[in-house]
Amino acid sequence: MQEIALIIMPFVLAILSFLKKSGKWDRTIIVFAAAFHMLVTLYLCSKTSSTAAFLGADSLGCLFLLILSMLFGATTLSSAPFIKYTELGYFNYRYVIFMLLLLGSMTGVSLSRNLGLMWVFAVAATLASAPLIWHYGDRESLEAVWKYLFVCSVGIALAFVGVLAIVEAVPKENVGVSLSVDILANRAALLSPQWSKVAIAFALVGYAAQMGMAPLHAWLADVHVQAPSPVAAFFSGAMVNCAFLAILRYYQIFASTPLITVFRGLLFLFGVLSIFVAAMYIIKTDNFKSKLASCNIQHMGLLTVGMGIGGSAIYATMLYVLSYSLAKHLMLLTSGNFLRAYGTINTSEISGGLNSMPKSSWLLIVGTFALVGPLPSGNLISEFLLFKRMIAYPYWMILIMTLIAVVTYAIISATLHITLAHGNASVFMQNEESLISYVPQWVFIAMLIMLGLYIPRWLDVILKGAASLLGGV
Amino acid sequence: MLLGASLLYISTTNRIQTYVKALVIQGCLFLLVSLLYYKHLGLLHTVIISLEVVAVKIVLIPFFLMYTSRKLDIQGDGESSKETYLSVCVAAVVMFICLTMAVTLKKSGSYTDVLSLGISASAVFIGLFIMTTRRRPITHVIGFMVLVNGVFLASLSLASRAAFMVEAGMLLDVLTGGFIVGIFFNNIKSCLVAGA
């Protein structure tokens, strides 16, 4: 019941936002949605359901729901300027409506325990997110949304073939086909191995396109650059996680079968390729948001490498999903502060940020160190746990560590250039550092450091529960 | 078999009008297949699916594609005859590989008949091929339509086991509609003409 309420409420609020005559209530509506979502999520996480045919919050779903809820809360606060502009009539559509539709769809993906239903929510999320990327309505954002819709739609279509292949894989004796993840996981040994391989391949490629993994990452950088910063931040943290969850649901089905070795092999290869592409791309690009997009690709790569290794790396991967989502989100929000102030986010065009925007600059420096590791945080701990498990594959470990070092160097040097370098500073357009533009990020940094020093018992239970569902220890 | 022939027909062309004609033919064939699957689908599902096929695949999408190409004055994709010849060869090879794979999968216990399976897989891969090799975004949309038609055929073939999957597959048409309406209303001529 709570699950249905959690999905339906954003849709109802979106309709309410659409029907009202003035934009005055938008802020109240979105804040109410964020508070409601967080409260119900915490309630669901306190009593995870073991089995469900369609909707239910198991440990895995709870983890992703919790991330979604936290990110939406921070996005809501950072969205204030966009809602204000909408109220003033700058934009010809409603920012809040599509944010709420996106929230509802992604909540559906997180709570779905049925492959078909999850796919339907993934389609809804793709459709709801497109107008948000096209927020500014200019040519560049139109091209970005075109690219995004195109690549993701192909991914969605291929993921649907994955669902069809699962239907084919169910033995002939079972007349009624259930796409429930729990039922399929229990009967995984009975599934046809050939069709299961087809399902794994198509689902992986399909959802990898939505995750922005190489070689289907073309849309990710454009979306990061063209979408408003809160949307890009929400996208980078929540949307790609939803696609990752979809892959994990397939992983959960096959976790106890011999086919999991094939699945792990594919995940590992996809992961290494993504990390490689991220390391190459980050050197070429000058735009800071594009660099963060590369970090995102590297992050997704490391996540799939973690799942590809399996065993104790799965727990580390779950912790990494949580901590990295917070870190990426805070970095994209902070880069939005610089974009608003300087009118550009090209690294070479911004310098001396520490003098002009000290609060955001300190935030960017600390955030970068939390993002890439040196600061004791959830990221550092989860990466340490991942590499500890990766010692069994020394050559791969050296290769991956080298590539991650390239990404780390590129992002740190860009941050230091923006904040500390003295050069031909660009025209400073406005000096506006409102409380709302940096408080959510500091809260996230505090949470990241806390995750590095102490993981609360209730969170540890969720992380271990999620890892155990995926065959981890 | 007729769907397979229409896939080869699509590969032979580089004119938008011919692409759209081929899509309409495919839509009509899907209507026929949906009616033939009446026993498996039941009355309600058959009516819904047939209406969707007529409205979206036969009328709306081809109309919008033609209207957009005329409005933006896009006649074709500008391929040379050599490239077209290569496309047909690739489509034939893809079809052969897909049918061979379908035979292998059938042996491992598949419900779908070899022809449906092979043709739907061919449509998916030929659609991907069109998307990756053609220059203009409008042809990319047509390639995506071919891919979606392949997925639709695959879901129809499984109608006896999971009729709801056919309706879920129809959501892909909504996505395609989103593309085309996007072009139609936003008039992204610069992107479409430049083949960005």
Image (tube, grey):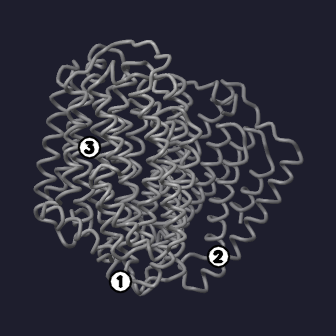
Residue A72 found in image quarter = top left
The amino acid type found where label 1 is placed reads: Arg
Mark 2 and mark 3: Cα distance apart in space: 45 Å
Q: Earlier in the sequence, mark 1 or mark 3?
A: 3
Vertical arrangement, residue A311 with respect to residue A47, above or below = below
The amino acid type found where label 2 is placed reads: Ala
Instruction: Write down the chain letter for disc 2.
Output: B
Q: Where does residue A135 sit, x and y in percent of width and height?
A: 41, 27
Whether marks 2 and 1 lie on the same chain: no
Vertical arrangement, residue B184 with respect to residue A151, above or below = above
* Residue picked out by circle 2: B102
Q: Is residue A127 visible?
A: yes
Q: Where does residue B159 sit, x and y in percent of width and height?
A: 47, 69
* Residue picked out by circle 3: A71
Q: Classify 10 Å Cα crowding around label 2: few (below 14), some (14-19), many (20 and above).
A: many
Camera-nearest residue between B103 and B83: B83
Mark 2 and mark 1: Cα distance apart in space: 25 Å
| Nearer mark to the viewer, of 1 and 3 | 3
Instruction: Write down the chain letter for disc 3.
Output: A
Q: Where does residue A281 sit, x and y in percent of width and height?
A: 57, 44
* Residue picked out by circle 1: A187
Whether marks 1 and 3 lie on the same chain: yes
